[in-house]
Image (cartoon, helix red, strand yellow):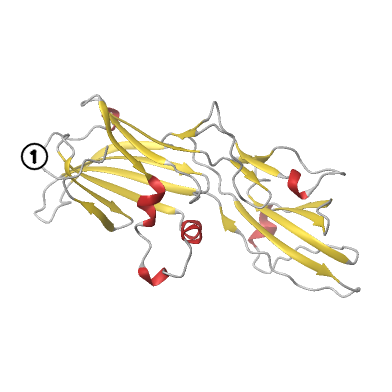
Amino acid sequence: MTLYIYDENGNYVQTRTETGSALQDENYRMVIDLPEGSYRFVAYGGLACEQHSFSPLAEPAKGATFNDLQVMLQQEEYTSRELLHDLFWGTLEVKVEGEMYRDVTLYLMRNTNNVRIVLQQADMSSEPLDIDDFDISITDNNYHFAADNTLLTDGQELTYLPWTSGDDLIAGETAQGETASVAYAEFSLSRLMTTNEPRLVIYSHQQQETVVDIPLIKYLLLLKSEKYATMGDQEYLDRENLWSIVFLLNDYTWHDVQIVINDWTVRNDNIELK
């Protein structure tokens, strides 16, 4: 964990870092000595790890301010195809008074998501699916963070490609005991924000056209139960981090497509998805 400390005017004070087995102890506490005053803590889990996927643009130093702190996803030519190391973020305002110690709790939220796309033939007699017949990608501008965990728009979208993919025949998958043909692609994404418009795109080499091009956020929010009606859309996206989307196909024609997201059927009609 990396903790950046700023004073009440947003001026950088110090950095504290803890790694290794100490963080596995449920009773671990970071002890910080500070003079009286008001402070703002900004904490990241995952920045200091050897396999980190996110890095600060510049480590805070004397003269830096809270607004100077920026964190960016490591990528190559605006493309990411890696399994991202988890990133957590949290902030807390603390007032130090007198010489007595006090305990404060800084809660962290996860900034990374895993999205698994599954294509399955609805007609068991159809030709088996081959993942190499498809190009599947997700585009979003969600790789550059300000200190308050909001996104900074750079004007350049990032293309996420699968960090793993494949195809398989699953015996006895259907109610009739038939073998199902499936292909899958799994993505590792940065924070999903309602202010952005990421898109899931599937291109079929067999049909030589884009067969799916959908607004990812709008579809994921269809899962939000009425039990959480008082929960904001952004909070819902931040609380969930594992997403699975299943496309049930009728051969390669993509008619009568059914979409299942996290076990919820959200679409089953004759409307094209393009």
Q: Nearer the viewer, residue 223 or 118?
A: 223
Q: What residue did someone put label 1 on?
A: 125
Residue 1 image point, x, y percent: 68, 53
Residue 127 image point, x, y percent: 13, 33
Q: Amino acid at mark 1?
A: Ser
Residue 155 image point, x, y percent: 56, 33
Q: Quadrant of residue 8?
A: bottom right
Answer above or below: position of 5 versus 63.
Answer: below
**Left or right for 62, reference 148:** right
Q: Quadrant of residue 92?
A: bottom right
Q: Residue at x 17, y 47 (%)?
A: 171
Q: Nearer the viewer, residue 197 or 188?
A: 197
Q: Residue at x 29, y 58 (%)?
A: 263
**Left or right for 269, reference 118:** left
**Left or right for 182, reference 13:** left
Crowd around label 1: few <14 · some 14–19 · many ≥20 (10 Å): few
Q: Residue at x 49, y 49 (%)?
A: 192
Do we see residue 51 in this rendering? no
Label 1 sits on a secondary structure element that is: loop
**Left or right for 13, reference 115:** right
Residue 85 image point, x, y percent: 56, 44
Q: Residue at x 44, y 42 (%)?
A: 198
Answer above or below: position of 136 versus 195.
Answer: above
